[in-house]
Image: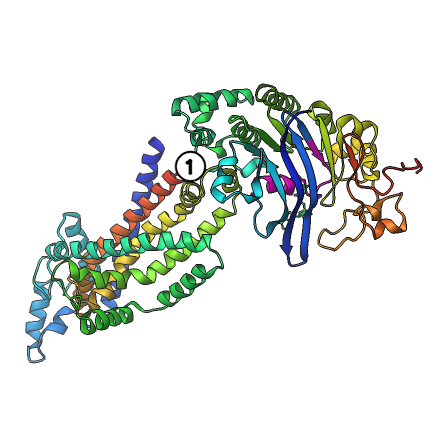
Amino acid sequence: MKETLIDVKDLCIQFQTPGGTVKAVDNVSFDIKKGEVFALVGESGCGKSTTAMGIMQLIKEPGRIAGGSINFEGKDLLQLTRDEMTQVRGKEIGIIFQNPLDSLNPVYTIGYQMTEGLLVDKMDKKEAYKLAADMLRDVKISDVEERMKTFPHEISGGMRQRVMIGMMLCRNPKLLIADEPTTALDVTIQAGIIELMNELRKKYDSSILIITHDFGIVADIADRVGVMYAGNLIEVGEVFDIFDNPRHPYTRLLMKALPTITKEEGRLETIRGSVPNLAEERPGCGFADRCPYARDFCHHQKPELKQISEGHMCACHFAEGGLKDEQ
Amino acid sequence: MNDIMRFIAKRLAIGVLVVLFVTILVFAIMQMMPGDTIDLMVDTRVSAEKVAEIKAQWGLDKHPVVQYFYWLKNILQGDFGTSISLKQGVKELILQRLPYTLMLTGASLLIEYLIAIPLGLWAAVKKNKLPDKVLTVSTIVLWSMPPFWLGVLFMMVFSIWLGILPLSGWSGIKSLILPAFTLALPTLAQIFRLTRSEVLDVLDEKFVTTAHAKGLKNKVVLVKHVLRNAMIPVTVMFFLSLPWLIGGSVVVENVFAWPGMGQLLFKAISKQDFVIVQGVVLVITVLTVICNLIGDIVAGVLDPRIRLE
Ligand SMILES: Nc1ncnc2c1ncn2[C@@H]1O[C@H](COP(=O)(O)OP(=O)(O)O)[C@@H](O)[C@H]1O
Ligand SMILES: [Mg+2]
């Protein structure tokens, strides 16, 4: 059994809005082992990005982390001072944002921004430059020497996205969080980037938390999968368990909807109803309103995330008994 | 490089037109005022023939258009003319006074920016908290204070009651303090507000989150990423406000009897001494054009997205 790198426990993240408190992440717990790739999947708006930003403690107003703990290599990140957390970011945990188009500072060159993080690690300037240039080549950017001198507005959106990926990869973080890193990228480049992540894992035994709608990618690199629904983690398991033996009704429908989901960027048209309003109190199971198996008590009693077999957890009242395959 | 030269040349050409236009306008306004310098100077007992003779001597009997071109021709040869009321060369008068005006505006610019930028950054970071609220309210108060009123208040407090600073005129560097602050404070409020709102805008940008995600220290993020971007419009404002400051100093110079160009201009207008008025306006307009041009060039240097064209 491998060592645990990060252990997220009962993480709660809320947004204070005029419409009420949005519980974007509600008691989410999962862990990632060293060298493991953990995929977080689920419809848009179910709290995946918020979970990622929560781990980095980059939640902006009106959001705040309302509870829980994030154990990373023996320390609780939520208890660190601001300066201590600063030392974790980028070096220990790197993050590739969703839609990273405006994520580069318009007034600095690509080279400056690529090396800026490396220089934090007290690296020699020339060495940092060389490393950054090599990284850019790895993310398939041509004329690297030229590119290092250009400004973000002078290169294409896809290229900026790759610069961002390279920027976060080049410091070999122990944990890389990649929030839909390859959406909008061309298929061949996409494959290259997945390959780079795989390399990071092999060379440095790094762990990866990947958020994606693309089950192809999940099958490709993930070891374990967590399924999120309306701010809750509703099923966690080995990638084979999730694909071959999904236990939560939502996961099952998700698997059935596979081809549409990839195309429609995560909109689950095939499941009737829509995601509940996260600002409202939900005493029962968040999925009950849309669930074909739901009974009365599902609306009142919240199912806990329970272990149903070795390494497989599910939050459904029927998870253990099994669902009758109807519909 | 060639592009920049062409840009500068084009802007200078436009600048020359602006200067011409302004001097014509000012000349026309001076002409529209009833009477002229001589009428204001001579005693009522002087005979009409004598007055006409003096006017002819100064070329005031000619048609205004002819007078203007006469003035323009001299200017092009570097001759600013002679003041009728003071009987002194205008160029000498301006050169005597320009350093004082530049000193006053320079000092007040320094005060404004050195105080307003850090305060603006601080207020933005502490948005809606106590420091922000206090600063926002106090700058509104400052902004709404007329400079002459502020000047008189300062004189009362620091010169008359406390007696620690000179009342007026120039008697060494200490004399600079009151007029410089009087000139600076109302504009300081403006720059504070601009800095604050720009910083708030930049703080919302995604690249700031990137900078934090890289593990840069908060101070580094604020200075290198946030302030660096917020400074672009503030710097442009600096150059645009410079000529206004020189204009604004007319009032302050008069309150403090400051021996600068503003006071010269004020007296010249009241005496309808158009040679001085034209000369001073020319200097201010040229400074304005140059400052605007520098502002544009600096904006292009600070913001790679701006192409000079
Ligand atoms: N700034 C915000 N203000 C209010 N609600 C927010 C904010 N950011 C995110 N949310 C809410 O948090 C929920 C989760 O969002 P997100 O984590 O982006 O979902 P995902 O990444 O899974 O698509 C959404 O329902 C959204 O309404
Ligand atoms: Mg997201």
Residue at the farthest bottom position: B45
| Rendering quarter of residue B56 | bottom left
Q: Nearer the viewer, residue B173 or A252?
A: A252
Q: Nearer the viewer, residue A28 or B179?
A: A28
Task: Tell me if A109 is positioned left or right of B73 in this view.
Answer: right
Above or below, A127 against A4 in this view is above
Task: Tell me if B50 is positioned left or right of B194 in this view.
Answer: left
- The region drawn magenta spans A39-58
Q: Is residue B26 visible?
A: no
Q: Nearer the viewer, residue B108 or A77?
A: A77
Q: The residue under label 1 is which amino acid type?
A: Pro
Q: Tell me the quarter of the image containing the N terminus of chain A.
A: top right
| Rendering quarter of residue A225 | top right
Q: Nearer the viewer, residue B114 or A73?
A: A73
Task: Tell me if A240 is positioned left or right of A67 in this view.
Answer: right
> At 38% across and 56% down in the image, what residue appears?
B192
Q: Is mark 1 within 8 Å of ligand 1?
A: no
Q: Which residue is mark 1?
A: B304
Q: Residue B290 lies in magenta, yes or no? A: no
Residue B163 lies, in percent from the top left, at 17, 70
